[in-house]
């Protein structure tokens, strides 16, 4: 009977229950549980297993550049990172409120790592996240226009609770990329969150986007009420990691 039960649990993909029940049988723990305790144990095991698998999927689909974490952030020196602000952002309530975060600073200062750390935290909290290098993303969207998969790609981006646009403004937007950016921002405005990292100060973004009318519309939606972090100091790539600090990359 137990073998039959295990087989059915596996076929129904109740892997948490399967492993918990199998372990209880192998360790002779069944007699230690009352019937209601056993049911609670199996349900809790299934719940935890599904939560863990969802987090693993979220991390896989996010395609982060770095395996980053809030705990490993480097606060020392004159980097202009406010620990209290980071802790508040790590609660991910800004995603619930559909708010944006703009991270600026020179190359190597740690913008991408900070964004990735917040993205990882969002995945752990249960949000869908997509990390994208901005030039590569819009090059991919151009190819999608050509092969007919553009709508599918835009829909995939729209479904994410948090979109991270890394290296924004490295190169100016052409007409096609500018229109795609407008579509992405319009789809997300007031519905989902965005993290943007850029070497350029926000005041220079208008010039990079181009086409005054469209740039005004895009920036009005991105910047209004956004959280901001302006990282400072020398490049962390010049530093050597010690035993108790993790050097952040950009």
Image (cartoon, rainbow, N blue to C red):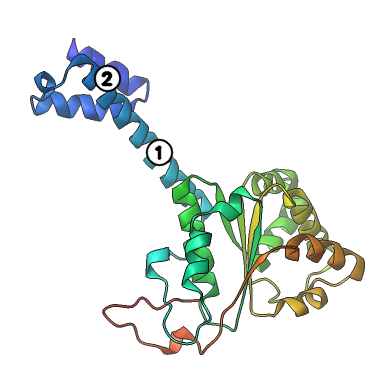
* Image vertical order of residue 202 relative to residue 23, above or below: below
**Secondary element at tag 1:** helix
Please, which residue is most extreme toward the top here? 1
Q: Which mark is residue 173?
A: none
- Horizontally, residue 192 falls left or right of residue 72, namely right
Residue at point 13% right, 21% down?
Answer: 30
* Image vertical order of residue 25 relative to residue 213, above or below: above
Picture coordinates of residue 61, whole percent (x, y): 51, 49
Can the viewer see residue 185? yes
From the image, which quarter does the N terminus lie in? top left
To which residue does mark 1 refer? 51
Count of numbered labels shown in the rendering: 2
Closer to the observer: label 2 or label 1? Answer: 2
* Image vertical order of residue 129 relative to residue 64, above or below: above
Residue at point 48% right, 50% down?
Answer: 123
- Horizontally, residue 139 falls left or right of residue 132, namely right
* Circle 2 residues within 10 Å: few <14, some 14–19, many ≥20: few
Picture coordinates of residue 29, whole percent (x, y): 10, 25
Picture coordinates of residue 223, whole percent (x, y): 74, 66
To which residue does mark 2 refer? 39
Q: Earlier in the sequence, mark 2 or mark 1?
A: 2
Q: CA distance from mark 2 to mark 1?
A: 18 Å
- Horizontally, residue 20 falls left or right of residue 211, namely left
Please, which residue is most extreme toward the front here? 84
**Secondary element at tag 2:** helix
Can the viewer see residue 15? no
Picture coordinates of residue 8, whole percent (x, y): 30, 16
Residue at point 37% right, 25% down?
Answer: 13
């Amino acid at each position: 009977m137990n073998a039959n039960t295990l087989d059915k649990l596996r076929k129904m993909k109740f892997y948490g229950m399967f492993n918990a029940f199998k372990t209880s049988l192998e360790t002779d723990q069944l007699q230690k549980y009352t019937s209601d305790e056993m049911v609670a144990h199996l349900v809790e095991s299934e719940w935890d297993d599904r939560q863990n698998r969802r987090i693993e999927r979220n991390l896989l689909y996010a395609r982060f550049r770095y395996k980053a974490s809030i705990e490993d952030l480097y606060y020392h020196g004159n980097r202009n990172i406010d620990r209290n602000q980071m802790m508040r952002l790590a609660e991910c309530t800004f995603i619930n409120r559909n708010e944006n975060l703009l991270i600026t600073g020179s190359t190597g200062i740690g913008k991408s790592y900070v964004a990735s750390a917040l993205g990882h935290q969002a995945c752990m909290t249960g949000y869908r996240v997509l990390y994208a290098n901005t030039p590569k993303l819009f090059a991919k969207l151009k190819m999608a226009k050509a092969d007919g998969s553009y709508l599918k790609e835009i829909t995939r981006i729209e479904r994410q609770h948090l979109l991270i646009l890394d290296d924004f403004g490295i190169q100016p937007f052409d007409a096609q990329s500018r229109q795609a950016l407008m579509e992405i921002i319009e789809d997300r405005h007031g519905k989902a969150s965005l993290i943007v990292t850029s070497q350029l100060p926000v005041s220079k973004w208008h010039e990079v986007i181009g086409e005054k009318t469209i740039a005004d519309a895009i920036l009005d939606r991105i910047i209004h009420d956004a959280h901001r972090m302006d990282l400072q100091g020398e490049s962390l790539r010049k530093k050597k990691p010690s035993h108790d600090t993790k050097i952040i990359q950009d």
